[in-house]
Image: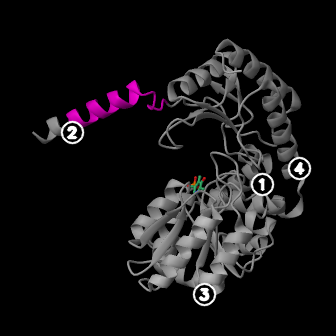
Amino acid sequence: MGKGVLENFLQENIKDLKDKGLFNVIDPLESANGPVIRISGFDLINLSSNNYLGLATDSRLKAAAIEAINTYGVGAGAVRTINGTLKLHVQLEEQISAFKHTEAAIVFQSGFNCNMGAISAVMDKDDAILSDELNHASIIDGCRLSKAAIIAYKHSDMADLRVKAKQVKESGLYKKIMVITDGVFSMDGDIAKLPEIADIAEEFDLITYVDDAHGSGVLGEGAGTVKHFGLSQKIDFQMGTLSKALGVIGGYVAGKKELIEWLRVRSRPFLFSTALTPGDVAASLKAIEILSNSTELQRKLWENGNYLKHGLKTLGFNIGASQTPITPCIIGDENLTQKFSRKLYENGVYAKAITFPTVPKGTGRVRNMPTAAHTREMLDRALEIYAEAGKDMGII
Ligand SMILES: *Cc1c(COP(=O)(O)O)cnc(C)c1O
């Protein structure tokens, strides 16, 4: 009987998603996730990875990973708190805190479980969290896991945040109040208004948490959104990933020594999930070393981002109001978005359709992530393909 219930549930819901154009199809890569990728035997210009600086395929990172694997093996062998902490992990944490200008840092196996673990280690049912309505799924899940009251504020609407912060504070119902935001919003490429958020936090005594998954390596000479605004002393949690611009895998929180000490004893993925592998740690160390010594990759990333944006806008696409290299092409209708993405694919550009529930209904988009590794020729070719497909489908 139970099986019938599950089968009915799955069949009905999968059909519903497919009817609405919301069923995601995965195309496995037959190559590295570089600026050109191979799928089903065809080479495509890749505008869908988060590999902003091209570090995922960088030879220096690969060599560092291989060396660490040869020395330490492929797995860490235990959770961090038993004996899975290698000296390499400690070095990585020291390097992250130096790069972020904080006292200390802690690394996790992914950005997702970092948010799950860090938020819930500090906030509980007696607390409240003010959360931007467009925050990433991992923030939402971390907030839910904490059992704190979650109060969403309108996206980057500082008047709304202020009103809600005042209400929550003056209600006297909560012991601690946190404000949490993405540093860069990945679907639109806009930057959080951190100076205003920091002011509101000071006024109402809020704990501040910035998830800089898309700002690290991209803004603030690589150190992220908080550094970009010069707020390193005012943000309590500087969370980031090692998996996007840094090209590897993992997440971290950088902050005050006491905060990191607490996370080491109370964040559950740190206590109950095996440590990052030696290869990942060594490659991440190399990535941060590269970013600490040069801003060349960022310069190239921004140059490419601006070039692509200018090109798409000139063609007549709605590219929204991105302030970073992230370049959405907002189409609207989910089915049309999927078809447009398919058309680009057939013509040689891989730019994934992003639709509800990742973005609000009716704002389907093809999102472009130019990287430092793209050449001018690749971007020109991508623009030609965009022009052709856009005209064919009556979008421009
Ligand atoms: C991608 C992302 C994460 C998750 O990071 P992973 O390292 O991929 O698990 C968390 N927050 C934001 C804002 C992200 O974009």
| 3D distance between C-alphas at marks 3 and 1 | 28 Å
Query: Going 47% across and 32% down the picture, which residue do you hit?
Result: 24
| Chain-order first, disc 2 or disc 4 | 2
Horizontal side of residue 333 vs 285, given as left or right: left
Residue 89, image quadrant: bottom right
Q: What residue type is labelled 1?
A: Val
| Chain-order first, disc 3 or disc 2 | 2
Q: Which amino acid does label 3 sit on?
A: Glu
Instruction: Characterize the local packing of mark 4: few (<14), some (14-19) or many (20 or more) Cα atoms within 10 angstroms.
Output: some
Where does label 4 land, which residue?
A: 299
Horizontal side of residue 144 vs 11, given as left or right: right
Magenta includes 18? Answer: yes
Span highlighted in magenta in the image:
7-25
Q: Residue furthest left?
A: 1
Task: Residue 115 in the image: state x and y as whole percent.
Answer: 53, 65
| 3D distance between C-alphas at marks 3 and 4 | 35 Å
